[in-house]
Image (cartoon, grey):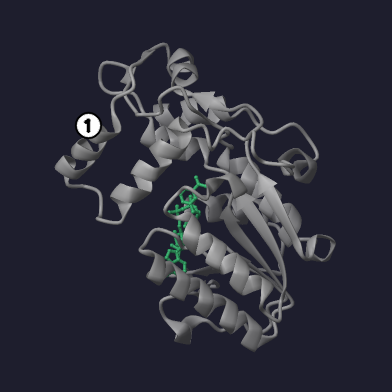
Amino acid sequence: MLMITGATGALGKLVTARLADREDVVIGTRSPAPGERRVDFDDPASLDFTGVDTLLVISAGAAEDDVVIARHDAAISAAEKAGVRHLVYTSLSGDGDHLTYALAHRWTERRLRASSLRWTVLRNGLYAEFLAAIAAPGPDGTIAAPLGTGRLAAVAREDLAEAAVRVATAPAAHAGRTYELVGEHALGGADLAAALGGSYEPGSLAATRAALIGAGQALPFQVPMLMSTYSAVAGGFLDGTSIERNDLRTLLGREPRPAIEAYVRAVRG
Ligand SMILES: NC(=O)c1ccc[n+]([C@@H]2O[C@H](COP(=O)([O-])OP(=O)(O)OC[C@H]3O[C@@H](n4cnc5c(N)ncnc54)[C@H](OP(=O)(O)O)[C@@H]3O)[C@@H](O)[C@H]2O)c1
C-alpha cells in the first residue's frame, strides 16, 4: 500500500490525480472524505500507518520551525512504529539554505537518515506557481517584486508531482537517494514581465517588507519566509547554477515543462 499525506494540498492533489487508477493507494489528509484516512501530524493519534509499505510525506511546512519539526518527527516516528518500509519526503533544493524555511527541511532529512526506514529525499525547487504568488504584476501590469537582477530556477509543480509519483511507485530503485529537482531555465523579473507583456520595476526589500506588514495579511513567521525568498533570488543563490546535479530531467525521462508557462498560467488564474 502507498499512502500520500498532505493529499489535498496543491502538490498532493496533482500526485493523487496521477494515482487515481491504482487500488493500492490511500489518501491521507486532515479532512478525509469517505475511503480516505485522517492524517494530521499535529495529532499523533491520527498517525496510524499500519499496512502502509510506502509513505509519501508531503512536507507540512507553513508554520514556525518548531511546529514543522514536531510534525515531521511525529510522522517519521509513526512510520517507524508501523513498520513502513520506505518513506519518500518532499524537501527543499540544496541551494535553498539561505531561506528561513530550509532549517526544518534539513532537520527532517537528518532525522530520516538516522531512522530505521528506507528513504528517498526529493529536494524540490521553488514552484513556478509560488513565483506567481510572490512576483505577480500589480493592477498596472508592473512587477515590483524585489528580485533585483536575480533569477529563480523555478519548476512547474506538475513536474514535481510526476517525479514524486515515479519515485513513490518504484521506491526500491531510489532508496538512500537525495534528488535535486530544480528548473533548467532560471527566470528573472524581466523574463516574467516579458512573458506577460508588462514591465519590471523591482522595489526595495525595505519597501516590500513594509508593504507586507502593512497589508496585515501575512502571519508573523511568513514575513521572514517571503523576505528570505526575495533576498536569496536577488542574491543569485537560487538560479540553479550551484546545484551539482539536477535530477529533474532524469526522473521525468523527458524535458521538464517550461516553468515560464506555469508562471503565466498561475498569474492568469
Ligand atoms: N517548493 C515550493 O515552491 C513550495 C512552496 C510552498 C510550500 N512548499 C512546501 O511544500 C509543501 C507542499 O506544497 P503545496 O503546494 O501542496 O502546499 P499547500 O497547497 O499549502 O498544501 C500543504 C498541505 O500540507 C498538509 N498539511 C498541513 N498541515 C499538516 C498537518 N498538521 N499534518 C499533515 N499534513 C498537513 C495539508 O494537507 P491536507 O489539507 O490534505 O491535510 C496541506 O494541504 C508545503 O506544505 C510546503 O512545506 C513548497
Q: Residues within 10 Å of mark 1 (few under 14, many from 20)?
A: few
Q: How many marks?
A: 1
Residue 174: x and y in percent read: 79, 60
Identify the residue at image location x=72%, y=42%: 244
Task: From this view, report whether residue 133 is shown above or below residue 198.
Answer: below
Identify the residue at image location x=71%, y=52%: 179
Q: Amino acid at mark 1?
A: Ala
Quarter of the image where the C terminus is located:
top left
Residue 60: x and y in percent read: 46, 63
Residue 255: x and y in percent read: 74, 31
Quarter of the image where the N terminus is located:
bottom right
Picture quadrant where residue 21 is located = bottom right
Q: Which residue is mark 1?
A: 207
Q: Is residue 136 left or right of residue 179?
A: left
Out of 110 and 21, give the one closest to the viewer.
110
Task: From this view, report whether residue 43 is shown above or below residue 232.
Answer: below
Q: Is residue 21 left or right of residue 27?
A: right
User: Is residue 186 among the parts visible in the rendering?
Assistant: yes
Q: Secondary structure at mark 1?
A: helix
Out of 236 and 195, give the one closest to the viewer.
236
User: Is residue 40 among the parts visible in the rendering?
Assistant: no
The yes-or-no answer for disc 1 within 8 Å of ligand 1 is: no
Task: From this view, report whether residue 188 is shown above or below residue 45.
Answer: above
Identify the residue at image location x=43%, y=67%: 68
Residue 17: x and y in percent read: 61, 52
